[in-house]
Amino acid sequence: MKPFFEEHSGIVYTGPICRFPYPVHMHGTVEVICPSRGYVDLTIGNRRHIVHPGDCAVVFPMTVHGYNSMLEDPSGVCMIFPADTVPAFSALFQDMCPDCPLVPADRLPVALPDIISKIASLPNDAPDELKKAYIHLTLALILPSLSLKPNGPEEEKDTVRRVLEHLARHYTEPVSLNSLSEDLKISVSHLSHIFSQQLKINFRKYINILRIDRARQLLQTGMTLTEIGFACGFEDSRTFRRAFSSLQGMSPAEYRKLRRAGTGIITGTDPADPEKE
């Protein structure tokens, strides 16, 4: 996963929804989330939304969003595509944004679930033209139910993108609001506003999310826990274990054991670490 600014240029994706928490991020494409089972807790812009089965959420380009949690083992369809995938709606995605990105099931046409079901059954190698046709149908059914307004200033979106891109490159280094302010020439107060009001997350917690996401990947290798902690930017093993346990609900060693049991991977041991395997 890439929990930062993502570049999906030219990609048309139709497939399963994300089933795991995914940190706040943004990209220049449209994202449509339609769960058919379970519930998805999303942050879109500066608001949180619980997306129920049959509901649809539409994330417009360059909008900060993230998957906070999943409830009751959700399944469903996600579509990610450039705004010009359907020319009839490209100007709308460029010039407008929704008052609320969530459309409840009772406001959607009865034909939509059948379309979503057909999209879910598409093979992985389905041609893009077929995917685009289904996306066109989906948008034609969903967009009339959205209340739209003109886009706000693009400058602020660009600032958020710069912050996320910078942290994506430097989260394993010593980083603080002060150092970020110096690097990007953005005031500390403005950065604090971005995290508290737009990203809805504490700065330090966001850095830890990036680091722990990377640590989960490295725990599937033969690196020791100490090596992983340092590689992800933590000052010592204790801080790494505390941050990991806080976000994952288990220690790094416990997570590694669960992954090893499920995948059969070979992991290393750290004789200096009290949580060695």
Image (spheres, rainbow, N blue to C red):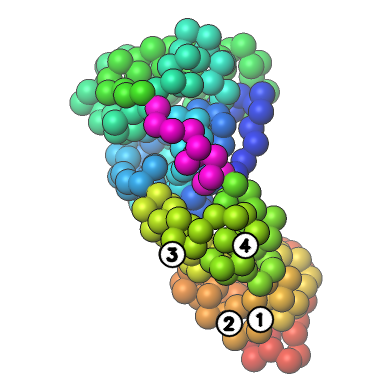
Dot 4 or dot 1: first in sequence order is 4
Give how far across and how far down residue 4 sits, in percent.
Answer: 59, 49
Which mark is on residue 202? 3
Predominant SS along the magenta part? helix
The residue singled out by tag 1 in the image is: 235
- Report if residue 164 lies within the magenta region: no
Residue 122 lies left or right of residue 198; in this view the side is right
Q: Is residue 124 above or below residue 75?
A: above
SS class of the residue under badge 3?
Answer: loop
Chain-order first, disc 2 or disc 3:
3
Please identify, in this view, whether the residue under mark 4 or under mark 1 is nearer the observer: 4
Q: Nearer the observer, disc 4 or disc 2? A: 4
Residue beneath the point at 53% across and 80% down: 242
Task: From the viewer's side, name the closer residue of 198 and 4.
Answer: 198
- Residue at horizontal 76%, vertical 66%? 221
**Residue beneath disc 2:** 239
Q: Sort mark 4 into few (<14), some (14-19) or many (20+) by Cα contacts within 10 Å.
A: few
Question: Which dot, 3 or 4, sits closer to the camera?
Answer: 4
Residue under the image location 62 percent in, 62 percent down? 182
Quarter assignment of residue 273: bottom right
Given the image, on which type of amino acid does mark 3 rest? Asn
The percent position of residue 178, horizontal first and vertical second, equals: 56, 68
- Structural distance between the alpha carbons of marks 4 and 2: 26 Å
Which amino acid type is shown beneath numbered disc 4? Glu
Tell me if mark 1 has few (under 14), some (14-19) or many (20+) residues whose alpha carbon lies within 10 angstroms of its own: some
> What residue would you read off at disc 4?
182
How many labels were placed on the picture?
4
First in sequence, mark 3 or 4: give its number. 4
Asked which quadrant contains residue 254, the reply is bottom right
Segment tinted magenta in the rendering: 151-161
